[in-house]
Image (cartoon, rainbow, N blue to C red):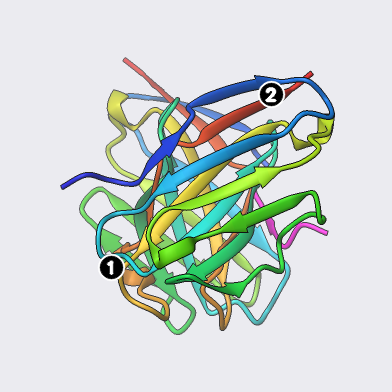
Amino acid sequence: DQQVKQNSPSLSVQEGRISILNCDYTNSMFDYFLWYKKYPAEGPTFLISISSIKDKNEDGRFTVFLNKSAKHLSLHIVPSQPGDSAVYFCAASYNTDKLIFGTGTRLQVFP
Amino acid sequence: EAGVTQFPSHSVIEKGQTVTLRCDPISGHDNLYWYRRVMGKEIKFLLHFVKESKQDESGMPNNRFLAERTGGTYSTLKVQPAELEDSGVYFCASSQTSGRSWDTGELFFGEGSRLTVL
């Protein structure tokens, strides 16, 4: 049973516009959420995180929003750039060192 | 500073054969993790070493998988005998601090070892 779900396998956005990547989770015990970015033939790299006690965290062009009541988080990228084209993984954790990942969303930013 | 390195980058073997994947963590990192991504699916946790000790091996699929980290440096993950469903990309990750430092992104992943079982 998948505890972290990314229901959109792909997303295409024009350069300069906003990219919104979504993630849903089922386990209310999760207390930390992260987004990782992955380019082809590379390992995932950390992008941004949020604690469950917050509802928003911002880092430059990247903002993560957490809606605990809906068990939903989203990653906003504004403005989107061609270099943002990658697979984005949502991940969550509770009380342990291990991460539980979603299946990923492939973002393509076109000119 | 060298990142997490994994070898081989790609291995193609036949069902029933043995494969050993190696991971060299970032120097000084006590925590070493193995994850796996089967094609198109989520990245799944396999196990976690703290130095040479297995802290959590709850994600290991079955006893065909054996992970070791002798001396607390590099780690190997052996699959014996390999089955078709073992195909995927095996990622190794390392971090320096124990406990969770998610907000600083201290978990570093290698490029992965792609395993294809025919």
Residue A13: numbered disc = none
User: Which residue position is annotated with label 1?
Assistant: B104
Q: Which SS type dominates the magenta stretch?
A: loop
- Residue pushed farthest front? B71
| Amino acid beneath label 1 | Thr
Q: Assess whether residue A2 is covered by the magenta stretch.
A: yes
Label 1 crowd bin: few (<14), some (14–19), many (20+), radius 10 Å: few
Q: B9 or A17, which is in the foreground?
A: B9
- Whether labels 1 and 2 belong to a single chain: the reply is yes
The mark nearer the N terminus, 1 or 2, is 1
Identify the image quadrant of residue A109. Answer: top left
| Amino acid beneath label 2 | Thr
Q: Assess whether residue B66 is covered by the magenta stretch.
A: no
Residue A29 vs A90, above or below: the answer is below
Q: Subunit of mark 1? A: B
Residue B30 percent location from the top left of the image: 36, 70
Residue B17 vs A96, above or below: the answer is above
User: Which residue position is annotated with label 2?
Assistant: B116
Question: Is A111 placed left or right of B7 in the picture?
Answer: left
Magenta stretch bounds: A1-6
